[in-house]
Structure formats: structure tokens, C-alpha cells
Amino acid sequence: MTDPRLTPLAASLPATVPFVGPETQERAAGAAFRARLGANESVFGPSPTAIEAMQRAAAEAWMYPDPESHDLRQALAAHVGVGAENIVIGAGIDGLLGSLVRLTVAAGDPVVTSDGAYPTFNYHVTGYGGRLHRVPYRDDHEDPDALIEAARETGARLIYLSNPDNPMGTWHQAERIARMIEDLPDGCLLILDEAYLECSDADTSPRINTSDPRVIRMRTFSKAYGLAGCRVGYAIGDEALIGAFGRVRNHFGLSRVSQAGALAALSDEPYLREVQAKIATARDRIAGIGAENGLTALPSATNFVALDLGGDGARTRAVLDALTKARVFTRMPGVAPLDRCLRVSCGTPADLDILAEALPQALNQGRISGLT
Amino acid sequence: MTDPRLTPLAASLPATVPFVGPETQERAAGAAFRARLGANESVFGPSPTAIEAMQRAAAEAWMYPDPESHDLRQALAAHVGVGAENIVIGAGIDGLLGSLVRLTVAAGDPVVTSDGAYPTFNYHVTGYGGRLHRVPYRDDHEDPDALIEAARETGARLIYLSNPDNPMGTWHQAERIARMIEDLPDGCLLILDEAYLECSDADTSPRINTSDPRVIRMRTFSKAYGLAGCRVGYAIGDEALIGAFGRVRNHFGLSRVSQAGALAALSDEPYLREVQAKIATARDRIAGIGAENGLTALPSATNFVALDLGGDGARTRAVLDALTKARVFTRMPGVAPLDRCLRVSCGTPADLDILAEALPQALNQGRISGLT
């Protein structure tokens, strides 16, 4: 029965969640994961400088946060090379995507994304009544031409593209994305999700032009900066669009401790470089563990690796479930043909030792399951 | 010119913010406040246990937060005496109000509040295209009868009531609110904002009945618990309505550090009682400082006191501005006749010494300003 207190749109929404967290799985199993390799977190942790800044800020947590996030915004503006008026900070890219969809998508408006791309974006589009059009990946990459064509056909207000890509780890060169921007149909805004930007030295990010109203970038402290628990993302765009967030966002929504942590993390570039090296080493190790088991690793510019198990989604699911039983947390893409892959986040050497030990038996389980 | 990228609703929204933060004023003045008595924060700080919990959690900030806030929700359920399915946690009451309005108010839907009550609620209603109907306070109290009548006349979907009240500090007895609930028109939901519940021992909160679909409560760790910087609020209601938040909320929106801090704060009841005693002492002191200056203090069940300056809003504004110049941060209600009052948050004895020193001259400035 429909709850009469809800709006027609709210009443029509499904009760799904974009992701089930590892803690939920741990509670269900009554046992902790031995290796946490499913959420593309940075197991290497945040900069010690950031930890100290958060610890200091904790004692001042009685004060509301600065709703303008002034200091962090100024530092990001300098870091990115834009004005502070071109940056808005939010509760992770998730929170910013929600605000952006709210600002730009009215009920029934068409939106284009790739089939298998970030579920939380789809959650927000559905949540505001938008109509999602999905185009397939091409050779495990998001397909700029197909996205543009679908936007043209549907009159889409938004295109979502992550580069480097989640969940496959693949990427396009900056120059390819720059061309895509030139091809955008009139009135269509490109959301360029660069969450994994700092995870490799691949040349993925076209030059930012804040006078170009066709693109908004999303970046985060959740990946290479190791602050997923703090929920700090930021968007970069033209002043008019960035300013519009101020009409709808939760102005006092960003924890004071999180702001302090992000500011300190941003300033510790040597630590970021250390993490980048550890990510690269871990990617190679995951590929190596895959190879030992006869699996191909997709090339990755992120902090995770998609291992091609060569079967269908049911097969991957069986392997993933076996890993979960062995207390190794991983995830997999939600749709075919991407779902032939297991997505493994970068871990410490100890984490990856556990993966190396558990994977052969899990693959065996997957084979048995595939036969029945 | 309207930005063609925005929805018609988004394009129509004003660029106002509900509150300007003290940091913004400090940056403008180039000087810090000597006493921070404007935002009803708890200057007494969070429990040392909470600070320690946050400091430990800071090192684990690389992990995404538990999107179910399981541990905190269980603890709150036990604390409140309801089921965990009756509680949803969000980024402060502000964040929860936004989600609730989104769930219940479609464009054009009528909503009722008091004229001068919480601006952030109004911000959300406007933001989702709702039509606000405001009824006057009666004798510096929100007026349950008038709210009910306005809801009946307009067919309102929501009534907002804070008890104890912000910005006046006044309150209704629990029994009065219970009667109001019985009078609610069919299909109208009462938002009972109990942010200041823990700030006094006044009997303000009617018994919670989670099978009653007519009421949703909002509570927070921002006031007596001293965690305004962490952004943790919670709503209590029937399972269907609480469950509906899961369809729209930012599931990974609540910082891991904040969750740890709130959980620890909730467990430290002796500290809460200490703070309650300090709040009572500070309220008396503020009233005393008022009396020394010939001002009446409104009775308060909150962590602030409304001092009646006996003039109009321009007079209060002049006094407030003079206090700001003296580096004392206070606020005032936004509309007449409430705006004859200056709202002063509870402070430490040192904070209130500064107020006592600065107030006479500020009042003098206000009198001069009133003469011109």
C-alpha cells in the first residue's frame, strides 16, 4: 500500500541501496573480513599529518563547521589552479552527485550513463524522477561516442562518465575526453567523475576551463588521500553552476573534523606520492596473483584491478561468495559483460598474501558452481 | 538570465543561505570572536570519551563509514526505547529535514510553520517547491492551536514545531504537545524538533508511540552533547516513514569519525549531567547580566537565553552589531515581534564575563542608534 504521506515520486521509488557495506556482511557472518579489498578504499591510510589534524579538530567538535569550507576551498583552488568560486565541497562525490541531479534533472528528464557504471549516480537520477538511458561499454571502456550519440538522441541533460573508470579500472587519454567535450550536444552537461585521478600517473584529465559551462568535474579525498570515512568530495566548474549548489546543499553538512583532515591531507604531497607508489605495486601484485591462477588483469589507472575470470556473472558471483566465506571482501560489476570480472582493491602486502592464499580455492568453487 | 542547465524549480530559487557562520564574520572583520555565543553550540565541549573515540577513529578514516550506522542506531534505539527500524541518522537535523521535505512535499504542496521559526526548515521547503504558511508566535511561544488551524485551512502536509523553541527558548509541556498531536488533521505530519531536549529537565517531550504515523521527532548531538561539528542528528518515527529515508538519503554520508564520537557521547551520561548543570548556571548568569542592564530574560529550556531589549528589530540589530564589533558573537530572531530579543547562547564563565563587559556599551550604542 502506498504511504499517503509520501509524494507520488517518493512513493514510487524502490527500497534498494546502491551498495551494501562490508560491515553489514560482517554482522551477517558474525566474523570480520581478514582483507578489505572491495570498496576501493586506501588501505594505506591517510597522511599522518591528516590524522593529527583530525585528532586536534576532535576537541573542537563542539563548534559548527564553517559552512563555506573556506580554508579547504581556498587550498583546493590553489591546488587545482582555479578560483574558489569554481569549487564546491560536499559529502563525498555521492553527495555532490545528488545535489547536481537535483539542480539539473526534473521529473522525466533524460540522462545518459554507461551500463554498469556508478550505481549511486543512477540512484540519484531515479530518486529525482529522471529517465536513465544506458549505453554499453566498448572493450571494457566507457564509450564516449556512444554516450554522445545517446545524449543527442534522447536530448539528455546530463552525461555521466568516470575517467579513470569504475568498476573496470580502464581509462581514456585526456585528449580523447577533450574531444568528447567538443562533441557535447547543446544543453547537455558532462559530469566527469575523476575520483581515481590521483591513483596513477596516466594522462587522463583534460585541462580545466572554468569558463566552459559544458563540464563539471568531481574529485574526492576518498581514494588516494585515504579519507573515505570523512566524506569529502569536491566539484569544479563554472561559477554559475558551482554557485547554484548553494541554493540546495546542506550548508552545515560537512564535518569540522573532515574539513581539517582533508586540508592537511592535501598539503602532504610527499605522502600522496608514497601512496601512489604503493598503489602501483599492489596493482602489479594483484595482476601477478591473477596470472598465477591463469587470469588476465585488465590494465588499471585506479586503486583496484578487474580480474577477468572468463565466465559469466554467475561464475564471478560464486567466486566472490567463496572469497567472502574465506573472509576476503571484494566486489564485482553489476551487469554483463563486465560481470565476468572480479574487482579487487589494492591492499597491503599482508592483505594480498591473504588474497593469494584464498583465490585458488575460490576459483575452484566457482568452477564447481559453474558445472552444476 | 536563467541558467538553461537548471530545472525551472532550481532556477527559481533564491541565492540566500539560512545562516552566515561566525567564521565568515571573523574573516570579514579580520579578527576572531572573543566569545562565541551565537550558534547555540555547547562551549562546554563534547565528552572526553567522545573526543578519545574520534581520535581513535581518525586513524581508521580510510574506511568508508558504515552506511547503516548500525552501532549508533542500536544504541540510540536502546536509549530512546524504540526499535532500530524507528531511527534514521543523518547529517544533523538540517540534513534530515531536507530528506523529509523531499519525501513528503511536492511542488506546490502547503506546509505550515511559525513566523520566525527555524530558517533551515523553510530553506528546504522552498528548495523543493513547497508553499510555506506562517502563523505568528503567541506570547513568545509557538502556537499549537494556530498551527493546527492553518494546517486545516491549507491542507498542509507538514507542520514544523520546535519544542523547546528556537529562537525564543520557550517551551510547551509534554501534555500540551500530546493534545496537539490528537488535533492533527488527517494526512498532516507533525515534525517535532526536539534539538534542545537534553538542555533542561523541563517536561517537554510526549511519550513516543512508534505506531503513530502522525509524528516524526528530530534530535541531535549538536546541542547538549557538544558535537555540532560532527553533524549527527536522528529522527524517530514509524517504521514506514523512517524506512522511506533509505530511498533518498546519501547512504554513505555520515563520517566514520562522527559516528564514533556520537556513540561515545551517548554512553557518557555523567558528562551529560555535568553539562546540563553548566547550562543551567549559564542561563542564570545570562539572565543576571540582562537584569544588571535592565533587561528581562525570557524563561528558557534550551542552551540559550532570549534577552528582551524592549525595542524593535533595528534596535536589536544595532546592539548585536555593537557586540560583534566588540568581538562577541550573538544572533537575533529574524522577524517581529521576536526580533526585540537578543539571543545569547550559554557560555563558560569567562565567555559570560566578556558578555557582561561588552553589553552595557552595546546597549548604549543601540539606544543612540534608536534615537537617530
Image (cartoon, coloured by chain):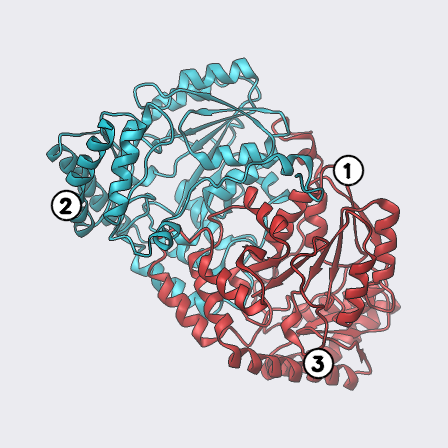
Chain colours: A red, B cyan
Query: What's the residue type where badge 3 is placed?
Result: Ile
Residue B14, position as x, y percentages in the image: 55, 36
Q: Nearer the viewer, residue A345 or A172?
A: A172
In the displayed structure, B25 sits above or below B104; it is below
Q: Earlier in the sequence, mark 3 or mark 1?
A: 1
Q: Which mark identifies residue B357?
A: 2
Dot 1: within a 10 Å radius of its alpha carbon, few (fewer than 14), some, or many (20 or more) residues? Answer: few
Q: Residue at x 57, y 17 (%)?
A: B155
Query: What's the residue type where badge 1 is placed?
Result: Gly
Residue B234, position as x, y percentages in the image: 46, 43
**Disc 1 designates what residue?**
A108
Query: What's the residue type where badge 2 is placed?
Result: Glu
In the displayed structure, B193 sits above or below A191; it is above
Residue B32, position as x, y percentages in the image: 30, 56
Q: Nearer the viewer, residue A8 or A268?
A: A268
Q: Nearer the viewer, mark 3 or mark 2?
A: 2
